[in-house]
Image (cartoon, grey):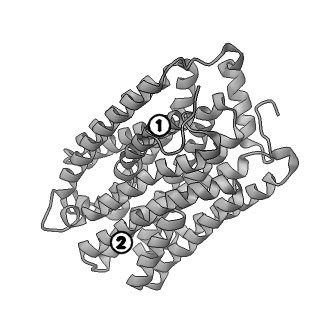
Amino acid sequence: MSHKSAWNRITLWASLLFVVILGFSRLSYGMFLPGIQRELGGSYSQLGILGTVNFIGYLAGTLCLPPLISRFPDRKHAINRTTCFLLGFAMIGSAFSDHYTPLGLWRFAIGFLSAIATVLVLSIAMDAVRPAEQGVASGLIWLGGSAGILVTGLSAPLTIDPSYLQGWRYAWAAMGAFGIAAAFGFTVVTNKRRLGKLSSQADMKTPDQERVNVYRLLFSPEKLLFLIGSYFFFGAGYIIYFTYLIPYLVSKGIPSLYAGLIWSGIGLAGLFNGWIGGRAIDRWPSGFTLAAGVSLGTIGVLGVTTGDLFLTALGAVTIGLVSFITPPLMTTSLLRRHVPQHAYAACLSIATAFFAAGQIIGPIVGGVGVQQYGLQFGVASSAIFMGISAGLAALYGRKQRKPKTRDLHLGA
């Protein structure tokens, strides 16, 4: 089966899907929070719980995917197609919520569907790319999330300005429609490529045997444990920042246009992050490369502690440039390098489950911080988790230097 360069129609459509999977369906919630609070009421800590519900759904989706793939190994494309279309419709459905309960149910469904779509879109797209260019391909796909943030930020005058009470509803409905269109495009280009793609029986293992080996591979301290741990703590840290940054800026009396521009600045910088991070991990496929990006992002978070708008904005752009999508794209690429192909989707799904667990814990911890010490402290607390993430990534880099951990395989 021939492989393509990183720049191809499949990665393009995958990137457009990630605009929805990451930028719209998950991270737009933090941007729309002031508008949602204005219409539905409640405190920011209460509304933060709905963010947690979204990530509980995300965790449930990642946990359901490995047994689903084991049960239907030849139905990956069909599962992905159904999931992506349903995600678009769920986005539209959430726009009609008139109370916490239906909004919470939609946020759970969106989290569940986006988790499955994240893993399967990446897995399908990376199957088509040459091994030497998979870091760049991963970066191109993940930068779709940055584009989603950029577009969401530009919608700020419509979605969080007090004069547009229901602006967030229109935005979510439009985002859902875009998601349906992107799902259709991805389906068309991947179906054209599916020519005789059945795996040979020799490469297939029984589900039980594969599951045992996958867990041994992921949770061994000598193999991938520190990488998975880094992904968990990054999930907790970055989601605190993205959940409470805009509410903090609004509470400071910053005009909605400026708050939206800061949010868009993260997305715009993230577009370069996808390209820089992908190139970097292809050239230096190491935990140290990951640790460098997360460390700089940790410093960026601390800009909020100064109380200065310029330094807060500069810190936000720094996060977008070097660490917003760096951990997901680099973890995706590192797993692809060190995990057998037939086990990649299961390994990525389990890694994503830990990322999701971090995102569940993050808003809870951040919400407690906001309630006790205010929004500024709550946002800044994300630096603690990101610092731990950087340390674990560096430990993984040290483990990689040992000869016995350079080439990981299921039978090791």
- Depth check: 44 or 61 in front? 61
Q: What residue type is labelled 1?
A: Val
Q: What element carries label 2?
A: helix
Q: In which quarter of the image is the N terminus?
A: top right
The mark total stands at: 2
Res 255 → quadrant: bottom left
Question: How far is mark 2 from mark 1, CA to CA?
Answer: 29 Å
Residue that numbered label 1 is attached to: 121
Between circles 2 and 1, the one closer to the viewer is: 1
- Depth check: 223 or 353 in front? 223
- Depth check: 8 or 393 in front? 8
Residue that numbered label 2 is attached to: 262
Q: Which residue is drawn at 79% across and 58% down?
A: 398
Q: Position of residue 292 (x, y in %)?
A: 65, 66
Query: Which of marks 1 and 2 precedes in the sequence?
Result: 1
Q: Residue at x 42, y 44 (%)?
A: 12
Q: Where is residue 233 in the image (x, y as percent from the top left)?
A: 60, 57
Q: Which amino acid does label 2 sit on?
A: Ile
Residues tagged 2 and 1 counted as in contact (Cβ below 8 A):
no
Q: Position of residue 141 (x, y in %)?
A: 47, 47
In this rendering, would 192 be left or right of 119? Answer: left
In this rendering, would 147 be left or right of 159? Answer: right
Q: Is residue 312 above or below residue 12?
A: below
Q: Residue at x 24, y 72 (%)?
A: 256
Q: In this view, does 78 lie above or below 131?
A: above
Q: Where is residue 126 in the image (x, y as percent from the top left)?
A: 55, 38
Q: Quadrant of the C terminus?
A: top right
Q: Which residue lies furthest to the right in this view?
A: 403
